[in-house]
Each structure stands twice: as C-alpha cells, then as structure tokens.
C-alpha cells in the first residue's frame, strides 16, 4: 500500500473511530466528569505513563547486549524518547525508524539495521506480554465474564488471541532453534515468487535473527521478560490512577485488559499518536466493566492527552540536542530494504 493511500486511510479510520466514540455523548457531560476529577491523581497518572519509556530503554539495553555489550542507558533513553515523539507526530509509525536511527547516531558502533531488528524483537516481547496480561485479567473475580461486546462475550474474542500468541511463540522458537532451515525455506519461496527480492529478504531475516540472540541466553531472556512485564504493569497502573482520578468503579485488572485491547486496536492504520483507535478501544474496555459513556470518554481523552504531552516534549528536546531533523528519518526508512 502506497504511503499516501495508507496515510489517508489512517486519517479516515481515526476520524470514524473518534466520531463513533463520541456518538451519543455530549461534550458538556464529559466536561462535567473531568471537572470533578482529582488533579493530583492525574499528575501521578502522567508520571507513571511517562515512566514506561525509561523502562523500555532499559529493556532495549538487554536486547542489544549479545551484539554490542551494555550500551549507555542515556543514549538508549534519548533514542527511545525521540522514537515515541516521532510516533506521536509523524505518520506511518515513523517512530520505529526514528528510534533505531537516533541510537545509531548516538552510538556509531551500532548499525541501523541491527538496531531496527532489535526494535522488531522488542515489539514481539510487548505483544506477547500484553496478551498474557490481558488473559490474566479475565481470571480476576471482578471481571464481568458475561458482559457482551457486540454479539459475543470477551472470552469469544480471546480464543483467537490465545491461538495467535501460541503461533508467534512457535515462530520465535523456529528462528532460534533452526535459523538455517528458516533461511532455506525463505530463499526457496522468494526464488520462486520474486527472485529479485531474495537477497533483500535474506538480509532482513538475518537482521531479525541477530536480534533474537537474547533468546539463547536464559539470563538475558529472563531480564528482558522482567523489564517487559514491569513496563506493562506500570502502564496498567497509570491507567488505574486515571480511573481513580475520575472516581471510576474499575479495578486494576481493567487496566490490564484495556491496554491489551488498545494494543490490538492501534495495529490498524491511524493518525500519528493513535488518536481514534485509543479512544474507541479504551471506551469499549471500560464498557465491559459497566462504566458509562461520558465517564469513559472523559478517561480516554484525559489519559491520552496527559500521556502524549510529556514524552513528545522530551523527544523534541533530545532531537534538537542531537542536531537531528525529521527529514533524517525519511531516509532511514529506506535502509532496511537496501
């Protein structure tokens, strides 16, 4: 899909989801909910929502350790902040490229392709842990298991999610245990389907496998898993603080569930910052716990704005300090395919 078409589709989907989220909810009712909320709890919510990014940087250090040793945490944190800022204000998920490019600039020994491959592995750990925590939330006694979403209960939708998770883990194990076999299969398929792209696909897979070196070390694997779990528990805690700020009757487990729904939802094309999918799926998750429309809209808007501003400002600051420009990231996007 061409970039312009994908960008236009993302804007359209985001607009539709925002419209559907606000449908039937008056602005005055949302404002009344927000006006009665707790400012100190909102500030605490913002702090914990921003704290997930240093945790992500610390995990990235462990992911890259097998190839580059222990990189300075400061460089990893600055690159992480720049990447999230780019995701928030640039289209087409430019943050993934920006994050890897910024690290390769801060630490010249780090190749962009290796850094980008590690970001892909980073996201796989995110997806695995987020889905596991989402499934865990359904075992909470407070979980309304019979509350329908559309025509089915949530358990109906979680079955394919669990299957997808199992397939992802199986695929990772294949890359770790028998990479040569995976390369051979890929080469054979590409040679038959698109011979001219065979070297490019091979290079991409080799870069991806290099990022999986961490899985061969039980110690590093545990370390990455630990920081991933801590990251998403912290994020769910920020969600819960937002619930408390608005006096919503939603347990901590609701944060685990909602962040899983949002993680799935933002996989569709959208505007920078995921405005639209976040609001829609956040409201759907709160509806499972019986939260009213005005209160749910108040939470999704309040949390999204407060989590958006600090990391975006930090990212712009680090971008300026490293003397980088947004145009640098456009060129970086071409590197993985080169």
Image (cartoon, rainbow, N blue to C red):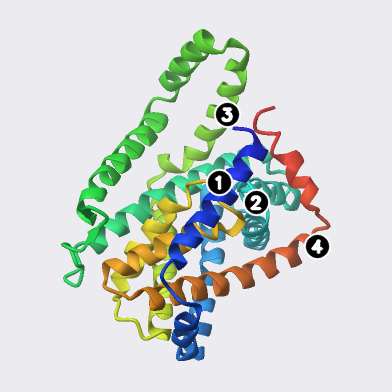
The answer to the question of whether label 1 and label 2 lie on touching residues, with beta carbons closer than 8 A, is yes
| Callout 4 crowding tier (Cα within 10 Å): few <14, some 14–19, many ≥20 | few
- Is residue 164 visible in this depiction of the protein? yes
Cα distance between the residues tagged 1 and 2: 8 Å
288 with respect to 108 (left or right) = left
Disc 4, SS: helix
Residue 320 is marked as: 4
Question: Residue 240: x and y, percent?
Answer: 38, 76
Mark closest to the chain's N terminus, 2 or 4? 2
Cα distance between the residues tagged 1 and 4: 23 Å
256 with respect to 49 (left or right) = left
Cα distance between the residues tagged 1 and 3: 13 Å
Question: Residue 23: x and y, percent?
Answer: 44, 66
Q: Residue furthest top?
A: 192
| Residue that carries the numbered disc 2 in the rendered image | 99
Q: Which residue lies at the image location 43% right of the left edge and 73% below the top edge?
A: 25
| Residue that carries the numbered disc 1 in the rendered image | 119
Question: Residue 227: x and y, percent?
Answer: 44, 60
Q: Which residue lies at the image location 80% right of the left edge and 54% below the top edge?
A: 324
Question: Residue 333: x and y, percent?
Answer: 69, 39
The answer to the question of whether label 4 and label 3 lie on touching residues, with beta carbons closer than 8 A, is no
Give 162 or 34, whichever is nearer the viewer. Answer: 34
Mark closest to the chain's N terminus, 4 or 3? 3
| Callout 3 crowding tier (Cα within 10 Å): few <14, some 14–19, many ≥20 | some
Cα distance between the residues tagged 3 and 2: 18 Å
Mark closest to the chain's N terminus, 1 or 2? 2
| Residue that carries the numbered disc 3 in the rendered image | 204
| Callout 2 crowding tier (Cα within 10 Å): few <14, some 14–19, many ≥20 | many
Disc 3, SS: helix
Mark closest to the chain's N terminus, 1 or 3? 1
The answer to the question of whether label 2 and label 4 lie on touching residues, with beta carbons closer than 8 A, is no
Q: Residue furthest right?
A: 323
């Amino acid at each position: 899909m061409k970039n312009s078409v994908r960008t236009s589709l993302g804007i359209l989907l985001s607009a539709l989801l925002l419209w559907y989220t606000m449908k039937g909810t008056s602005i005055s009712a949302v404002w009344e909910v927000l006006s009665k909320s707790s400012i100190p709890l909102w500030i605490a919510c913002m702090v914990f929502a921003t704290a997930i990014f240093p945790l992500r940087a610390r995990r990235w250090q462990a992911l890259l350790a097998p190839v580059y040793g222990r990189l300075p945490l400061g460089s990893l944190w600055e690159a992480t902040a720049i990447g999230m800022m780019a995701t928030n204000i640039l289209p087409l998920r430019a943050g993934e490229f920006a994050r890897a490019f910024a690290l390769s600039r801060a630490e010249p020994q780090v190749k962009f392709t290796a850094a980008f491959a590690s970001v892909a592995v980073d996201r796989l750990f995110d997806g695995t842990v987020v889905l596991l925590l989402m499934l865990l939330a359904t075992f909470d006694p407070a979980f309304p298991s019979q509350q329908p979403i559309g025509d089915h209960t949530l358990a109906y939708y979680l079955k394919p999610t669990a299957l997808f998770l199992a397939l992802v883990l199986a695929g990772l194990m294949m890359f770790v245990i028998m990479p040569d076999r995976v390369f051979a299969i890929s080469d054979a398929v590409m040679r038959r389907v698109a011979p001219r792209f065979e070297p490019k696909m091979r290079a991409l897979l080799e870069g991806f496998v290099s990022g999986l070196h961490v899985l061969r070390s039980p110690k590093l694997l545990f370390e990455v898993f630990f920081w991933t779990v801590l990251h998403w528990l912290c994020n769910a805690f920020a969600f819960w603080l937002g619930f408390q700020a608005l006096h919503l009757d939603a347990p901590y487990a609701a944060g685990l569930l909602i962040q899983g729904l949002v993680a799935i939802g933002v996989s569709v094309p959208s505007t920078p910052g995921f405005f639209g999918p976040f609001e829609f799926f956040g409201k759907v998750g709160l509806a499972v716990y019986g939260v009213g429309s005005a209160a749910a809209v108040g939470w999704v808007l309040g949390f999204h704005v407060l989590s958006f501003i600090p990391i975006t400002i930090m990212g712009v600051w680090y971008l300026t300090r490293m003397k980088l420009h947004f145009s640098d990231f456009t060129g970086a996007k071409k590197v993985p395919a080169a």
